[in-house]
Structure formats: C-alpha cells, structure tokens
Image (tube, rainbow, N blue to C red):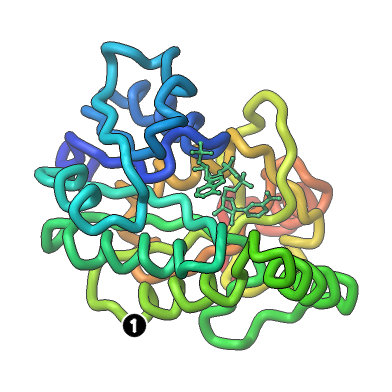
Amino acid sequence: MGTDRVKKVCIIGASGKLGQYMVGHALQRGYEVVGVCRERSVPKLAAFEGRMTVVPGATNDPEVIRRAVAGCDGVLTVLVPWGVRQYASGTAQAVLDHARPGARLVFSCGWHITRDGKDRYSRLFTLGVRIAAVLGKLVRAVEIDDQVEACRRVFASDTRWTVVRGSSLEEGESQGLPVWSRHVGDPVLAGNLTRRVDFALFMVEALTDDTLVREAPAIVGCLTPSALAHAGASKAPWSHE
Ligand SMILES: NC(=O)c1ccc[n+]([C@@H]2O[C@H](COP(=O)([O-])OP(=O)(O)OC[C@H]3O[C@@H](n4cnc5c(N)ncnc54)[C@H](OP(=O)(O)O)[C@@H]3O)[C@@H](O)[C@H]2O)c1
C-alpha cells in the first residue's frame, strides 16, 4: 500500500505511552486519527484535543471497536495482557472481525511472542517471562498466555497484519527507525533496547510498508551497538536475517 492510500487510522490503546506516541506520529503524517481508550483515560489525550476523535470504551468490546475502525485504512493496536478476562485476545479478535477487508492491521507485543518457534531466548529472558506469567496470574493482574493467544489468532488470520515485537523499552528522544529481524537471537538484536517513541514510529511506518505484511518483526533501536555493528557490516539500514 502506498502512503497516499492511508488516510484514516484507528489507534487502539491510544492513551497509553506507546499509543500517545503513535497518535503523534500519525498526526504528523497528516492522517485522520481515531483513538480508543478507557473512559477514565480520555483526559490523557487532552494534548491532542481537536486533532483526533476519541471513542471511549474497553478495547475488547466488539461494538466499541466496530464503531472506531469504521472507514479506517489502518488499525494500530496496543496488545496488553491486563486482567484475567482475555483482554488481549478479545481486543485482537474485535479488530480482526471489524476492520474493513484489506485494511493494514499492526499489533504491538514483546519479544516473548514467537511466530514459528525459531526464536532463541537467553535463559534469563525465559525465566523472566515465566516469573511474570506466574506472578501476574497469581495476583490476577496480568495474563501473558492471553497475549500469546491474541497473537496466535492474528498469525492465523488472512488479514494484512504485522505483529511488531518490541525489545526492552526506554524513554528518550527519537533515534530513528528501529532495525528488525525475524528471530530473537539474531545478532543484530543483541542490544535489546528500543526507545518507546521509535517503537511507535515503527508501528506507524509499518502501515505503508508492504514488505512487513504477515511478518512478525522483532525490533531494536538503530543506535544500539548490535544494530550499528550490523549496519557497518552490511551497509543496509534494515536487516532481516
Ligand atoms: N513495557 C515494556 O517493557 C515492553 C517491552 C516490549 C514490548 N512491550 C509492548 O509494548 C506495548 C505497550 O506497552 P507499555 O508497557 O509500553 O505500556 P503502555 O504503552 O503504557 O500501554 C499500556 C496500555 O494498557 C492499558 N491499560 C493499563 N491498565 C489497564 C487495565 N487494568 N485494563 C485495561 N487496559 C489497561 C493502558 O490504557 P490506559 O491509558 O487506559 O491506562 C494502555 O493502553 C505492549 O504491546 C507491550 O506488550 C512493552
């Protein structure tokens, strides 16, 4: 899809940190922006008042999503595993069911999601995810398994999806578009750090990048030592091994 074909985008989870950065990038590109967020979080979008439409509601409510994505060429979804009521998979399903056929659908998640099982994780990373999953479930606050289920449904769909898998994140000024690779464990990703603003940039750029359709890029900041070493070796700004 060329840039000129994206005119209106919906950002689901717009009030969060990643969501607000995506709203900023989308407005900068001149897109018409609709955002979905919980009613109580609408004030977090005050800085964008008059420049976007906000649809308040739960992101896993099919009716809310149906209204929000109407007429949108692209949908950017922040997949979060909150609670124990299948919030992430409900959100993904609502988007898959209601986005218009042919729309670009871009979802966010972390490196822990694997598409083909070929990612190679450090023991520390695997342990961290396991502990987070068990503790999260114990206190009924986080359901990591449900984010896995959400992505499984996206991977199985015949929509024009991209699942962007974020490394560890940090705040700070933009450093530019992150680099990506198909598998965690690929040397270019070793830096394991991305600025959140650049994660958002990658999500918005993906709307108009057809090479990312049905890909699950794992991303890392373009100025991390591993990304710089890779760029020096290949002289290519983007990498997918
Ligand atoms: N944090 C990391 O280190 C990290 C690393 C890699 C990838 N990621 C991925 O990056 C994306 C953004 O994550 P983030 O950690 O940076 O957070 P974030 O952008 O601040 O987003 C958090 C989202 O969760 C919503 N939320 C918070 N509590 C909720 C609740 N109890 N019920 C329903 N929704 C709730 C927030 O909505 P409100 O504004 O309404 O609170 C917001 O939309 C996610 O897809 C995550 O998997 C994160």
Quadrant where the C terminus sits is bottom right
x and y, in percent, of residue 212 in the image: 39, 61
Is 115 situated above or below 102?
Answer: below
How far across and how far down the image is residue 43, in percent?
A: 44, 20
Asked if residue 232 can be seen in this view, the reply is no
Q: Secondary structure at mark 1?
A: helix
Residue 154 shows up from this direction: yes
Q: Is residue 209 left or right of residue 180?
A: left
Q: Residues within 10 Å of mark 1 (few under 14, many from 20)?
A: few
Percent of width and height locating residue 62: 23, 58
Residue shown at the point (53%, 56%) measured from the top left: 80
Question: Which residue in the protein does label 1 denote?
Answer: 156
Q: Residue at x 42, y 36 (%)?
A: 14
| Position of residue 211 in the picture relative to residue 192 (left or right) | left
Up-down relation of residue 157 to residue 202 (above or below): below
Q: Is residue 5 left or right of residue 223?
A: left
